[in-house]
Image: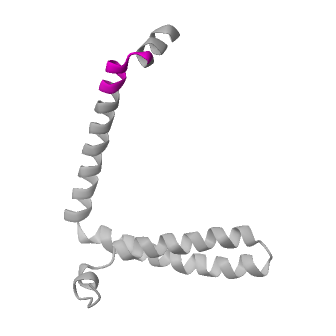
Amino acid sequence: MATEKSNLLLNPEATAAVASAGAGFTNDAFDKIKKARAEGPFDFRVLGFIGGLAMIASNSIAVLDRFFSFNFTGAMIAVYGIIFGCIIAALDAPVSVWTDADCW
């Protein structure tokens, strides 16, 4: 059984076929998720936006708590949480925020 798997890995054609099938499956799944996000109900985008704002708020409090308790590693992780929350809030913001902006 183990030799069959190792022989499969040594065969470039079989490995390329399996990798191609995996990449195709991943691309199809990504396209479905992208379509569902773009055309899905507006409620999911609102919930995502509120979740991003909640991440920003909770991690902002955590930065102060961890900084004053001299847990600098935890404070840096909370800063990354703030950055991630900003990205989520920006991506899930109402469309009018991006289309009405004068900076684009």
Say which quarter of the image contains residue 97.
Answer: bottom left
Q: Residue furthest front?
A: 12
For the residue pair 43 and 27, the one nearer the viewer reads as: 27
Seen in the picture, residue 93 relative to 8 is either above or below; the reply is: below
- Residue drawn at x 41%, y 70% as measured from the top left: 88
In the image, residue 39 sits, relative to residue 87, either above or below, namely above
* Span shown in magenta: 10-17
From the viewer's side, name the closer residue of 104 and 81: 104
Verify whether residue 76 appears in magenta. Answer: no
* Residue 39 spot, x, y in % from top left: 19, 63
Q: Is residue 24 above or below residue 53?
A: above
**Picture mark count:** 0
Picture residue at 29% right of the left edge, 50% below the top? 30
Q: Relative to the observer, which residue lies in front, 52 or 70?
A: 70
User: Looking at this rendering, what residue extends furthest in the left direction?
Assistant: 39
Q: Residue at x 63, y 81 (%)?
A: 61
| Lateral position of residue 75 relative to residue 10, left or right | right
**Quadrant of the rendered structure where residue 93 is?**
bottom left
Q: The C terminus appears in which quarter of the rendering?
A: bottom left
Residue 8 vertical position relative to residue 52 in the rendered view, above or below = above
* Residue at figure coordinates x 44%, y 19% from the top left: 9
Main secondary structure along the magenta-highlighted residues: helix
